[in-house]
Amino acid sequence: FGVFSDDISSCIAVTVVRDGRIIDSERFLFSGDEILDSDTFAHFIGEYYKKRDYVPREILFPKELYSDSFDLLREFLASSFEKNVRFIYPEKATMRRAVEMAAENAKEYCLHNRNVESKTDEKLFELASILHLEVLPEIIEAYDISNSGDEYITAGMICVRRGSFYKK
């Protein structure tokens, strides 16, 4: 687990490594309202593995996020998965580099996401200005209804939320 946090937002990057190979990675973004401290980090790890059918034998994370909450987390994971889990906050060598790399991934994702949101806000502001809207449009829907005679009527809709296509 790698963590990046500043006054605006926080991000946790999870990198799954098996047999020395990265097999998966995920990033979780939190707003500035959500405080990321050692207790909430331990809670996050518990929730993360509660949604999965596997927990590794070793979990690496930054030393500054270790707290007494990890004792409760260890018990929870042991009872849920019938496996003892070691929490490691590496201070040297390859393992430390892995945690630093995950933290760098979290930082890059956080900053990239801010940049994208900023550009989206600029485009939505411009659209609102052109259409003389009083507020930024959160959702834009467009419909197309076509027919070929009375029997073959078809319709389609697209939806854009906060500047991105919403496929659901």
Image (spheres, grey):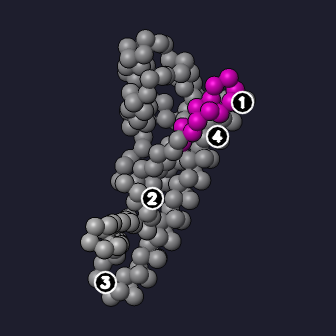
Residue name at image x 54 percent, y 37 percent: 14
Residue of label 1: 94
Classify the position of the N terminus by image quarter: top right
Quarter where residue 19 is shown: top right
Q: Amino acid at mark 3?
A: Leu
Q: Amino acid at mark 4?
A: Glu
Badge 2 density bin: few <14, some 14–19, many ≥20, Cα 10 Å = few
* Contact check, label 3 and label 1, Cβ < 8 Å: no
Query: Distance of mark 4 from mark 3, alpha carbons?
Result: 45 Å
Residue of label 2: 8
SS at mark 2 in the image: loop
Classify the position of the C terminus by image quarter: bottom left
Quarter where residue 162 is shown: bottom left
* Contact check, label 2 and label 1, Cβ < 8 Å: no
Residue of label 4: 100
Mark number for residue 133? 3
**Residue 42 at least partly seen:** no
Span highlighted in magenta in the image: 13-25
SS at mark 3 in the image: loop
**Vertical comparison of 95 with 86: above or below:** below
In this picture, residue 118 sits left or right of residue 73: right
Residue name at image x 64 percent, y 40 percent: 100
Q: Amino acid at mark 1?
A: Thr
* Contact check, label 4 and label 1, Cβ < 8 Å: no
Query: Distance of mark 2 from mark 3, alpha carbons?
Result: 28 Å
Query: Distance of mark 4 from mark 2, alpha carbons?
Result: 21 Å
